[in-house]
Image: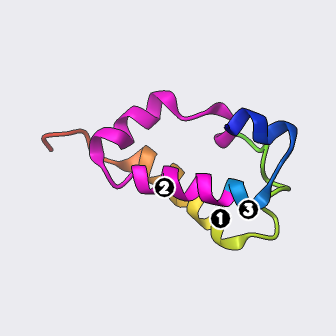
């Protein structure tokens, strides 16, 4: 789905996808899995221009990246 958005961007759909990935980071196991399996297109600047007029989605994307980076490993 994310790959097809790179070819034909839809800000509205992308906003929902980013929100779903952000919610996944609320779960420690899912968050740890996203460190390895997050689509590369959500980690680079592919969608920067697409989300330009969606400040909430930009904030969610930044929060998602923050959560993935700083989430403690299980058992700590």
Upstream in the sequence, badge 1 or badge 3? 3
Report the residue marked by disc 3.
12
Assign the C terminus to one quadrant of the image. top left
Q: Quadrant of residue 68?
A: top left
Query: Residue most toward the left?
Result: 75
Q: Which mark is residue 22?
A: 2
The image shows residue 56 at horizontal and vertical percentages of: 64, 71
Residue 18 location in percent, x, y? 59, 54
Q: Residue at x 54, y 35 (%)?
A: 38
Residue for point 73% across, 62% down: 12
Above or below, comparing residue 6 to residue 13 in the picture? above
Give the mark toward the camera: 1 or 3. Answer: 3
- Residue 17 horizontal side relative to residue 13, left or right: left
Range covered by the magenta-colored residues: 15-43
In the rendered image, which quarter is residue 44 located in? top right
Give the number of marks: 3
Q: How is the image coloured?
A: rainbow
Residue 16: give x, y in percent of width and height.
61, 58
Q: Earlier in the sequence, mark 2 or mark 1?
A: 2
Mark 2 vs mark 1, CA separation in Å: 10 Å
Mark closest to the chain's N terminus, 2 or 3: 3
Q: Which mark is residue 57?
A: 1
Q: Is residue 56 magenta?
A: no
| Secondary structure type for disc 1 | helix
């Amino acid at each position: 789905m994310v790959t097809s958005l790179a070819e034909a961007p839809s800000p509205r759909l992308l906003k929902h996808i980013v929100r779903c990935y952000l919610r996944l980071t609320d779960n420690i196991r899912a968050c740890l899995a996203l460190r390895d399996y997050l689509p590369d297109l959500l980690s680079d600047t592919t969608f920067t221009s697409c989300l330009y007029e969606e400040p909430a989605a930009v904030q969610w994307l930044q929060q998602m990246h923050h959560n993935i980076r700083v989430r403690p490993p299980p058992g700590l």
